[in-house]
Amino acid sequence: MQEIFCNMCGKKQKTESDILMEDTLSVTKQWGYFSKKDGEIHHFCLCEDCYDKWIENFVIPVEKKHTVEYL
């Protein structure tokens, strides 16, 4: 398994026997026409703590829903 690091704080995500033991936000964005990054693909990961810090700054809060079943 490839090691996963939080792009914001640099913390290595915990694994046991090649199983990720922490959840992370993984974002991949391919920029298109009318952006200053046309054709670039950006990817980053955030640990849960950094995600929480990031969304605290949102003017419009994150929409939250609860799931009934975990797949």
Image: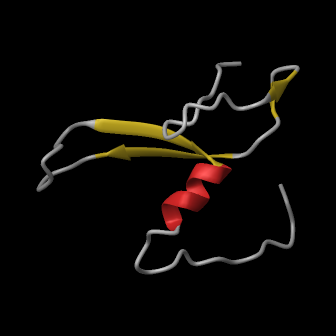
The residue lying toward the viewer, choosing from 14 and 32, is: 14
The residue lying toward the viewer, choosing from 56 and 68, is: 56
> Could you tell me which quadrant the N terminus lies in?
top right
> Could you tell me which quadrant the C terminus lies in?
bottom right
Reply above or below: 46 against 55. Answer: above
Residue 15: quarter of image? top right
Residue 60: quarter of image? bottom left
Q: In screen coordinates, is 39 left or right of 16?
A: left
Q: In screen coordinates, is 42 left or right of 22?
A: left
Residue shown at 88% from the left, 20% from the top:
17
Reply above or below: 69 against 61. Answer: above
x%, y% of residue 45? 54, 40
Reply above or below: 34 against 55. Answer: above
x%, y% of residue 57? 44, 69
Residue 69: quarter of image? bottom right
Residue shown at 57% from the left, 36% from the top:
6
Residue shown at 20% from the left, 38% from the top:
39
